[in-house]
Amino acid sequence: MRNSIKQILQEETKSTYVQKVVGHLLSNIKGGAHVPRFIDIITTYGLTENDVEYLNKLEEEALDRLKGISFNVTDYRGKVSVGGYDFKFVVRGLYGEEYRGPDWLADNSGPNHFPQINWTVEATVLLRGATVELIIGRPEDGPVTLGDAINNENYGWEIESEIGDVIQDIIYEVEPILPALGAYVSVDQSYE
């Protein structure tokens, strides 16, 4: 009986410890610190596999909060770099893929093999009324429709890549827990 009480108290203390770590990481990010690497968080704070699973759960909850919300990139000018883009997007879904570090580590243990989740956010970019100001064009030409820019065979691929970057930056701005925890979030966008 005495051992089980001691174990419960240790678990409660550990939970409090992880919450303090998360609070510290959040204050660092809000204070302008660089985004930490996931593995560095684990090793710096001596986290266990259960702690890491808790962090992964926090990431998932943060991303779930974004589902169904319509974002307008112009609302984030000055907070993130949106360039000449003006579009709206909606987060439709997400999925995660577990990653446990490189296979070449012989013992398959330690922080490199704790489960990190690589998240993919499925976002729908709304093309109606969406524009982009292109640097390659003449300023007097004004903005180009985003659909036309995406479909351009010379630079459409770059436009799509930049759209994904803008969406990712907004996600990190809205949910600062993600960069604080070193979360890896990629964007898979579709167009409507």
Image (cartoon, rainbow, N blue to C red):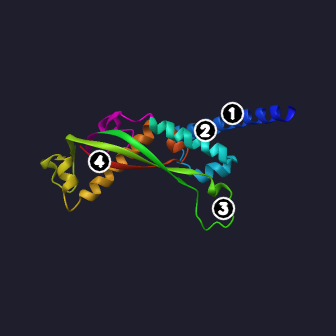
Dot 3 or dot 1: first in sequence order is 1
Q: Amino acid at mark 1?
A: Thr
Dot 4 or dot 3: first in sequence order is 3
- Residue 190: mark: 4
Tag 1, which secondary structure? helix
The answer for how far apart the CA atoms under marks 1 and 4 are is 40 Å
Q: Amino acid at mark 4?
A: Ser
Tag 3, which secondary structure? loop
- Would residue 153 be found to the left or right of residue 118 on screen? left
The question of residue 22 being in magenta is answered with no
Q: Amino acid at mark 3?
A: Asn
Crowdedness near tag 1: few (<14), some (14–19) or many (≥20) residues, C-alpha within 10 Å: few
Q: How many marks?
A: 4
* Nearer to the camera, 2 or 39: 2
- Residue 108: mark: 3
Crowdedness near tag 4: few (<14), some (14–19) or many (≥20) residues, C-alpha within 10 Å: few
- Residue 185: mark: none
The answer for how far apart the CA atoms under marks 4 and 3 are is 37 Å
- Residue 22: mark: 2
| The C terminus: image quadrant | top left
Dot 1 or dot 2: first in sequence order is 1
